[in-house]
Image (spheres, helix red, strand yellow):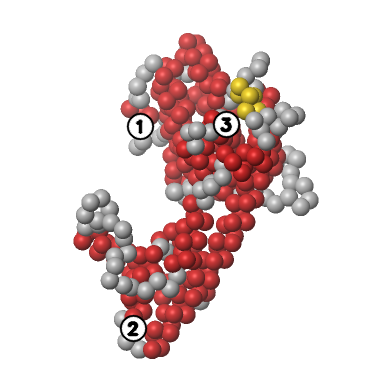
Amino acid sequence: EGGQRVAGDFGDLHVRALKGREKNMMMTMTTLGRDRGVRASSSSSSSGKGFGGPTMEEKMEEVKANDMLIDALVEAHGAGEQQVLDVVCESLLALDKGFWMRYAMRTDSCESSEEKERMADLANLVMKITEKLVKQSEKSLDSAQGWLIKLLQQAADEQGQWHLPLNEGEIDKMRAFMKAKLMTGAQGQGEGGLEEGEEPCDMESLLATSYAWMKKAMEDEENREAQQVVPLLQKVLQLYASEFLLNFSSQAELALLQAENEALEAAGDLPSSQPAKEALEGLLMSNEEEWNAKLAKMASEEACSEDALLVELQKKKELIILGMSGGMYEQRVLVEYLQELEERVQSAFGGGKSESAQVA
């Protein structure tokens, strides 16, 4: 049917349209390495917020938070290197320039040389752990970029070009590749599995890379070719959300919450509608381009009510929010996907969000 052709030279796309991709966590960790050894000085550790810079209250809160983290690291250091590793992993993004300036001040205030030496040893250990995490992050992101390019290639023609909008066959190829190659570890759904020498894909890194590439492409307003890549990356996020929501039984925490919901439904303590459940499953199995037509048909045939469908969507959303770590790209993709579907339901049925579908 023709469609809009997008140049698909992946090497060229990678170098030009997506050059300078954002690696948020890795950049933060790399900054930590550059900032190590920073000493307290008369200049402020903050460049200032707004016109007057941070308020005194905000400065005190920052100092308090940094002191709590330093205390936690000192306590962990007494228990062993593994405990320090755990604290660093949990608080990695808090180890910024302000933290190290506060750490230097705390070290300078030590009363004995032995205490200062222990603080210096701890600082060196934290630096070593941080550098190791940087290298691991780089490797994970490089692997994710390779997998993302391979996934996008599934929808390209023999000349390595895409035709937008993607047709059903092209989308199905991407979905099959994602199930077989990318979600085998987390979901247990792989059909073909990984070949010898292929490393498992870290989905969090792949999703983070997708967001970073989209942001870079949208910011490059003069490069029309780069902006045309955005729908392809959006399709990656949609397919991931669809497959995850259909097959998350291997996720222990989510499976437990789902079992609790089913017990409440059986006891009559939680609203439940089998037609709505089946309708939602059908929507999740469909491509996003089919949603409007399917929802319009449901509304006209009264296959299920708007309220019941919104309730089932809300239960899915609550599972994701309660059962997954906050701040992760995986959770963000899933919640945004469900919110978009929720808006489509409301539009198709012509109603506003009903009270029964609100978060309890």
Rendered image quadrant of residue 11: top right
Q: Considering the numbered disc 1 on the image, is that residue within a helix, a strand or a loop?
A: loop
Q: Nearer the viewer, residue 241 or 112?
A: 112
Quadrant of the rendered image containing residue 359: top left
> Farthest residue toward the right?
196
Is residue 234 in view from this perspective?
no
- The residue wearing badge 2 is 110
Q: Which residue is mark 1?
A: 358
Q: Is residue 228 above or below residue 352?
A: below
Q: 311 or 133, which lies in front?
A: 133
The answer to whether 17 is drawn above or below residue 198 in the figure is above
Residue furthest out toward the bottom: 113
Among the two numbered marks 1 and 3 on one chain, the one whose residue lies closer to the N terminus: 3
Callouts 1 and 2 close, C-beta under 8 Å: no
Q: Amino acid at mark 3?
A: Glu
Is the residue marked by circle 1 packed among few (<14), some (14-19), or many (20+) residues within 10 Å? few
Q: Which element carries disc 2, helix, strand or loop?
A: loop
The three-letter amino acid code for the residue at tag 1 is Gln
Q: Nearer the viewer, residue 77 or 279?
A: 77
Visible residue check, residue 139: yes
Instruction: Return the x and y of residue 327 as percentages of the image width and height.
Output: 44, 48
